[in-house]
Amino acid sequence: MSILPGEKLRYAETHFKFKLPWSLLYRPWPEIFTDAPFQFVPGEHPLLWIGVRDGDRFPVTIESVELDIRKVDNGTECAPSDAKTCALVGEKSRTQEVRTLDRLNLAAKNAFDFFPVEIGNLEPGRYEITPKVVVVRNGKKKVFKRWNFPGLKPAPLKIQVLAEELPKAPGFAVGEMHCHTCYSADHVEYGASTTVMQQAAKAIGLDFVNFTDHAYDFAFLQEDYTREAPSAPARFQELKQEIAALPQSPLLIAGEEVSAGNSKGENVHMTVLGPEGYLPGLGDCGRYWLSNRPTLPIAKLLEMADAPCFAAHPLQQMGMLEKFIFRRGYWKNADLHLNNCKNPVRGIQFWNGIRDEGFKLGRAWWIEELGKGNYLLPIGGNDAHGDLNDTTFVKLPLFSLGHNRHHVFGRVRTAIQTRHPEQGAAGTAAKDPDPQTLTQEKLKAAFAGDNCYVTDGPALWWERSGAAIVFHARSNGEMGGGFRYIRIYGRRRIASGLDSNKMAAQEEVLPESLVAASQNETITVQAAGFAYLRAECETATGRFALTSAAIS
């Protein structure tokens, strides 16, 4: 991510001054904030975290926390589409309660500290929670709401305690494919600890998390973002060892977000699922200013990775300054069609937290590739740096901060088929001796398959049944109820001389599509004559899902 205005950055770093004597954001206190998962599945007890950054420079003691808890009437939840902030519409405060947790005496003295705080029992429903934190430093006491970020008005935590299990396709694993831990830490942003993110993943109902920390952040010290680390590969191995020491579920994977060179010699980002070792990519790290040429081209990194790789937010719009200073560009068609590449790009992560212009352009590009017979997987992620509930970011370096709810950990999920009723791990015919345990190897094998869907609520998937493709759509009241539509798209084969794989220029919407459907639908489509079929759906409240292409 860049340090330029308009870039969506996370967990705002306020102490870095570029060696200048001043900054409107600088305070002789650590950054202190509260965060909580945006939802809690049945059986998970609500909790929040108090995060403290730079406690090693400015030690503090957290004395107490007061929670103003407001339950809101069942309003309509707005999906974060078209760059609109996700909000609760038409809701009114129904009940209010104040809970005080005193005598905590939590000592924050490390570069990163995350303290869990139990909220207490909450019945199913939607809540707005405003924490008021009392902190002491050098005998001086301060009280703040939600965070102590200078100039940024407090915003309540918004959580939903679920009464029903999340809709999910049988035999699929659901996860976050693009997020950052505190190993991603630089001039303007940082993530959360692996422990926090695993516990948050469990709370919101994820099966796996792919940590995609920046390649360039592994190459620099956390305590001084401008100094190169003795060994970037060693820091990457530290992350792997840290993950290995945690519980096995939800599954955590040490992935990477690598700055790579596209066909024009510009920096683009590629995420990798569980590479064996560190992959270098420093081209747009911002530490070398105009020395910004890509470290390695995409083709070389694909060869080195030997793991599933994905084009990350490939057409996310950016400004001219970002293109010039960091030599950033967009993914090109040539980057997906590399001759003799043994490990081609497996998918496109065009859904990056919200359905904005980058989503629309990326979706169109993906469909264009399907028409060429390049059956890439659609991938969803959030690019969350911590950001369990909302996003705080540096709006203008040295001057101002911002806030939105666009890039929230686990809100946009990727569901991948990991097993069939008659099979073990996806892509294998042998029975799996432990089918209930998800492993990194099983997940990598699953991404070699062709069956996945991306969603911010409903489940939408397909299965083959003889010469037909059967589509299933599932929702519930908490995920938006019934469907506004379920659309089935197909692209026909066109026989043309020796080229039997030629396809129609455009997809078509099939008559089997539904409008104003119930929250439990099954649609069977005869696949004869089609190169592939796929589906999209949207609930009454704007929750959305789409499937990969079912090749017929």
Image: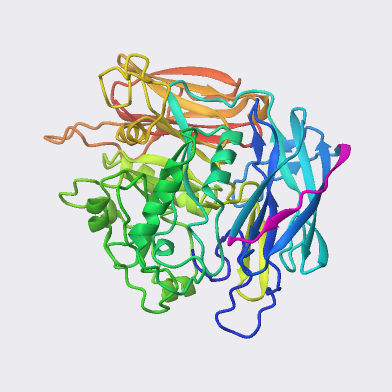
What sort of colour scheme is used for the picture? rainbow
Q: Is residue 466 above or below residue 462?
A: above
The residue range painted magenta reads 94-111
* Screen quadrant of the C terminus: top left
* Residue closer to the observer: 481 or 242: 242
Q: Is residue 373 above or below residue 461?
A: below
Q: Residue at x 56, y 83 (%)?
A: 19
Pinpoint residue 244: horizontal percent, then vertical percent: 42, 41
Q: Residue furthest left?
A: 498
The residue located at (45%, 44%) in the rendering is: 243
> Of 490 and 347, which appears nearest the observer?
347
Q: Is residue 284 rendered magenta in the image?
A: no
Percent across and percent down for residue 479 are 63, 30
Residue 492 placement, left or right of 488: left
Residue 202, visible in the rendered structure? yes
Instruction: Say which quarter of the image contains residue 435.
Output: top left
- Tell me which secondary structure the magenta stretch mostly adopts: strand
Could you say where residue 427 lies in the image, as x and y percent from the top left? Answer: 28, 27
On whether residue 98 falls in the magenta region, the answer is yes
Q: Does residue 270 show up?
A: no
Count of number-bearing discs: 0
Please provide percent x and percent y for residue 115: 66, 49
Q: Quadrant of residue 263?
A: bottom left
Q: Is residue 503 left or right of residue 239?
A: left
Q: Nearer the viewer, residue 531 or 48?
A: 48
